[in-house]
């Protein structure tokens, strides 16, 4: 093998050094690019995860607020209905107290008697016996404890009962007209 002059060797060494430096620069640039690409990917993934978590937490907060508001509204509505019912019950209690003083009318007796056939006995207040005797003659009258008033006719075989007592009339009004009464009282 021939001996190369020193200059040629130096040139070759310089060339090899230069090539090595170029390769190092390429590797550094590629490493920086890969690092930046990986960093951008990780940042994007983390941002996506944070956005999803934030969205999930916002939805959970909305659901919690909605449930809380619903519970408050339901509690208020229940309390409102309870108070309305208390007022309506108080109205009917006052009506019952007031109606205790009412006397049995001939019209109510006629209406009740027209609905029953055959023999019967009468249930009414002690104070109303006089008008019942006047209208119905010598019919059997039975005493009733805690009776608001009105009249009840019961067939002798107890199979037919015509209840035209004030209590049953009030209950009928409660049953069939409560919603109308509530609407009229609470329509503001």
Image (cartoon, grey):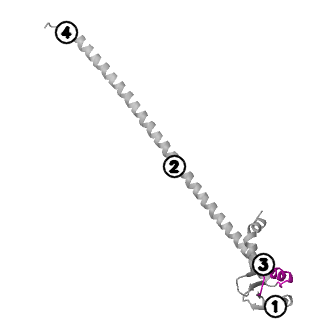
Q: Nearer the viewer, mark 3 or mark 4?
A: 3
Q: Disc 2 designates what residue?
A: 57
Local crowd size for mark 1, using a 10 Å CA cut-off: few (<14), some (14–19), many (≥20)? some
The residue nearer to you, when weighing 140 against 29, is 140
- Residue 174 point in image, percent of width and height: 74, 73
43 inside magenta stretch: no
**Marks 3 and 2 close (CB-CB < 8 Å):** no
The mark nearer the N terminus, 3 or 4, is 4
Residue 129: image tag: 1
Q: Nearer the viewer, mark 3 or mark 1?
A: 1
Local crowd size for mark 2, using a 10 Å CA cut-off: few (<14), some (14–19), many (≥20)? few
Q: Furthest residue to the front?
A: 118
Extent of the magenta region: 102-119
The mark nearer the N terminus, 3 or 2, is 2
Local crowd size for mark 3, using a 10 Å CA cut-off: few (<14), some (14–19), many (≥20)? some
Mark 3: which secondary structure? helix
Mark 4: which secondary structure? helix
Q: Disc 4 designates what residue?
A: 6
């Amino acid at each position: 093998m021939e001996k190369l002059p020193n200059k040629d060797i130096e040139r070759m060494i310089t060339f090899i050094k230069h090539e090595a430096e170029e390769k190092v620069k390429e590797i550094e640039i590629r490493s920086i690019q890969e690092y930046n690409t990986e960093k951008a990917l990780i940042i994007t993934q983390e941002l996506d995860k944070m956005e999803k978590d934030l969205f999930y937490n916002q939805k959970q907060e909305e659901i919690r607020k909605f449930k809380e508001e619903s519970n408050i509204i339901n509690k208020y509505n229940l309390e409102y209905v309870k108070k309305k019912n208390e007022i309506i019950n108080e109205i009917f209690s006052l009506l019952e107290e007031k109606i205790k003083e009412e006397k049995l009318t001939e019209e109510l007796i006629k209406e009740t008697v027209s609905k029953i056939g055959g023999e019967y006995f009468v249930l009414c207040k002690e104070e109303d016996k006089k008008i019942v005797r006047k209208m119905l003659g010598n019919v059997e009258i039975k005493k009733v404890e805690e009776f608001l008033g009105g009249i009840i006719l019961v067939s002798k075989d107890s199979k037919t009962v015509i209840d035209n007592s004030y209590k049953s009339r009030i209950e009928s009004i409660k049953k069939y007209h409560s919603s109308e009464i509530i609407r009229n009282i609470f329509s503001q």
